[in-house]
Image: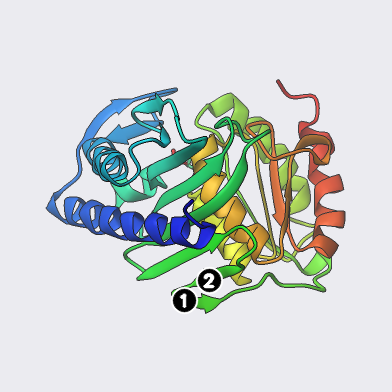
Amino acid sequence: MTSNAELREIATTVARRAAAFALQRRRDGVEIAASKSSLSDIVTRADRETEQLIRDTLAATRPRDGFLGEESGGGSSQSGLTWVVDPIDGTVNYFYGIPAWAVSIAVVEGDPEPSTWRALAGAVVNPIAGETFAAHAGGGAQLNGARIHVNEGVDLSLALVGTGFGYDAEVRRKQATLVQELIGEVRDIRRIGAASLDLCSVAAGRLDGYFERGLNPWDHAAGALIAQEAGARVAGIGEGPADRRLLVAAAPDLFERLHPRVEPFYADWE
Ligand code: LIP
């Protein structure tokens, strides 16, 4: 039986290798391969190639485990474990050359559904920053091997809060109405453009809180575990598990203020 710490090492090793590959592909030049939910929702050839590298490596290392990737979909599990992978989280940043993208790899137990899975280990690697965030369940969270922890004792009025927006223009217009209110109630807002890095920023105390609606499982699978292992509370609608409808992450004291402020706005969204 592989320990959670050993699973964390596998996630870290594969994510670092994939991040180095994606960085080299960026330097070679990036081409859009297709658009998905809208013209602005792009996928590059590097997304697909990086995910294939991760999928092949994990298939060789962990042949009985399942796989759920942003670009190539799912593969059933015989072991009860599934690797949840975003090969390049922050694809638009990657395409524009903004140094805020990461390879995100998590391994979960149970169905690959955020509402029911148990995240066992995860790694988020930003190769441009030379930063590897990693955690395993019960093992705490690390940045480049050093323990990290969320900011505590921060009032909502002094909180630096991250968020993001959907690829659909109408959805963004609606989401902006909440930000228009919130921006006068907190220290400031940041829109990094990669959920995994938003969540790792909460874990490392670079953000006090983060919320977003519309995330895919692979966007948050690793980052949410890293944030939780760094002391954050992570939840969604009705304080249930975070999922596509909403994710809110912050230290428990700030969560008690931030979640009630943003959850009602999204509670009745489809
Ligand atoms: C991105 C998320 C980000 C969100 C973007 C996009 P992708 O994932 O990480 O938080 O605001 O709209 O969904 O598509 O770059 O893997």
Quarter in which the C terminus is drawn: top right
Q: Position of residue 181 (x, y in %)?
A: 78, 47
17 lies above or below 117: below
Amino acid carrying mark 2 in the image: Gln
Which residue appears at 26% of the width and 42% of the height? Answer: 60
Is the distance from the Cβ of mark 2 to the nearest ligand 1 atom less than 8 Å? no
Q: Alpha-carbon distance for marks 1 and 2? A: 5 Å
For the point 86% across and 46% down, the residue is 260
- Under circle 1, the secondary element is loop
Q: Which mark is residue 142?
A: 2
Number of numbered discs overlaid on the protein picture: 2
Residue lying at the far left in this picture: please name it. 28
Residue 143, compared with residue 266, is above or below; it is below
- Give the amino acid type for the residue marked by disc 1 in the picture: Gly
* In this rendering, position of residue 244 left or right of residue 77: right
Say which of 17 and 5 sits in front: 5
**Where in the figure is residue 225, as x and y percent of width and height?**
60, 54
- How is the rendered protein coloured? rainbow
Characterize the local packing of mark 2: few (<14), some (14-19) or many (20 or more) Cα atoms within 10 angstroms.
many
Where disc 2 sits, the SS reads: strand
Coordinates of residue 5 in the picture (x, y in percent):
50, 62
What residue appears at the point 80 percent right and 24 percent down from the top-left corner? 268
| 238 vs 107, nearest the viewer | 107
Going 44% across and 41% down the picture, which residue do you hit? 83
- The quarter of the picture where residue 150 lies is bottom right
Q: Is residue 74 left or right of residue 176?
A: left
Q: Are marks 1 and 2 in contact (CB under 8 Å)?
A: yes
Residue where numbered disc 1 is placed: 145
Residue 29 vs residue 209: left or right?
left
